[in-house]
Image (tube, rainbow, N blue to C red):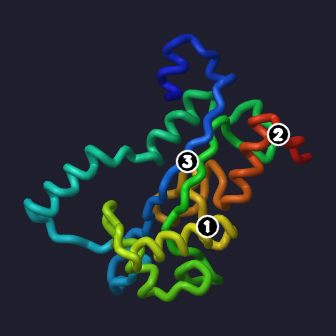
Amino acid sequence: MVTEAIGKGQDPTKVKVLSIGTAMVRLLRPQPGQRPSPFVQPILKPRIAPDARKVATAIIDDPPDVATFLAHIMTGSGKGVKRPADSRIIRMNPLISPVKKGETWSAPDCMTPADFGYLTNLDLDAVQRRQVDAISNYAGLWVKDVAPNQPIRMKGETIELEVGKGLFSEAVAAWKVLAGRAPAWK
């Protein structure tokens, strides 16, 4: 959408986008000697069938983090926007990711590691009651700022925020400023 607008002559600094997603999973990268955990990406052995499935799903699964970051760059990297916005692109998307509590990583709020693991392994065609309830419950945590929002860019190793908003309410506030619906915070 941003590429089309700029390609048709729109001033990139006038483009404002609210990008809404339906959730994505981001787990920690495994470290040498680390035990398996629902909070860490599993290390899989390369095999033809699973690798072919990854390629097939990559075709239908546009990586929003790359597309959103490129849109952020194309629209001026946030130069000249009023706070709390830090970009002309606002991403609102539940991020199914562990949260840091002190020095350890855990599931958001009162989720158990098993509940978190179940959610991270759901397929795109989730229709069973337990699956829908798990998604709905997580979305509720996201709206309450208990579960994270997907920012525009995260650090790969630490999954820490680099650009964008890490909480739903922060993304809402930034969009209101960009859309001219609230005074900018000082």
Among numbered discs 2 and 1, the one appearing first in the sequence: 1
Q: Nearer the viewer, residue 177 or 152?
A: 177
Q: In this rendered view, identify the residue nearer to me: 13 or 77.
A: 13
Amino acid tagged 2: Arg
Instruction: Give whichever of discs 3 and 2 has the lower sequence position.
Output: 3
Query: Who is closer to the viewer here, 165 or 157?
Result: 165
Across the whole image, how many numbered discs are drawn on residues? 3
Residue lying furthest left in this view? 48
Cα–Cα gap, marks 3 and 2? 18 Å
159 relative to 105, above or below: above
The amino acid marked with disc number 1 is Trp
- Whether pointer 3 and pointer 2 mark residues with C-beta atoms closer than 8 Å, the reply is no
Which numbered disc, 1 or 3, marks the residue that appears first in the sequence? Answer: 3
- Disc 1 from disc 3: Cα separation: 13 Å
Identify the residue under disc 2: 181
Q: Is residue 65 above or below residue 88?
A: below
Give the x, y percent position of residue 44: 21, 71
Image quarter for residue 123?
Answer: bottom left
Q: Residues within 10 Å of mark 1 (few under 14, many from 20)?
A: many
Q: Callout 3: 10 Å neighbours few (<14), some, many (20+)?
A: few
Point out residue 28 in the picture as x, y percentages from the top left corner.
44, 70
Instruction: Identify the residue at image location x=35%, y=68%.
Output: 127
Read off the residue under disc 3: 20
Q: Nearer the viewer, residue 11 or 43?
A: 11
Residue 30 visible (yes or no) = no
**Element under label 2?**
loop
Label 3 sits on a secondary structure element that is: strand
Kind of residue sitting beneath label 3: Ile
Location of mark 1 (residue): 142
The residue lying at 45 percent from left, 59 percent from top is 24
Location of residue 68 in the rendering, given as x and y in whole percent from the top left corner: 51, 41
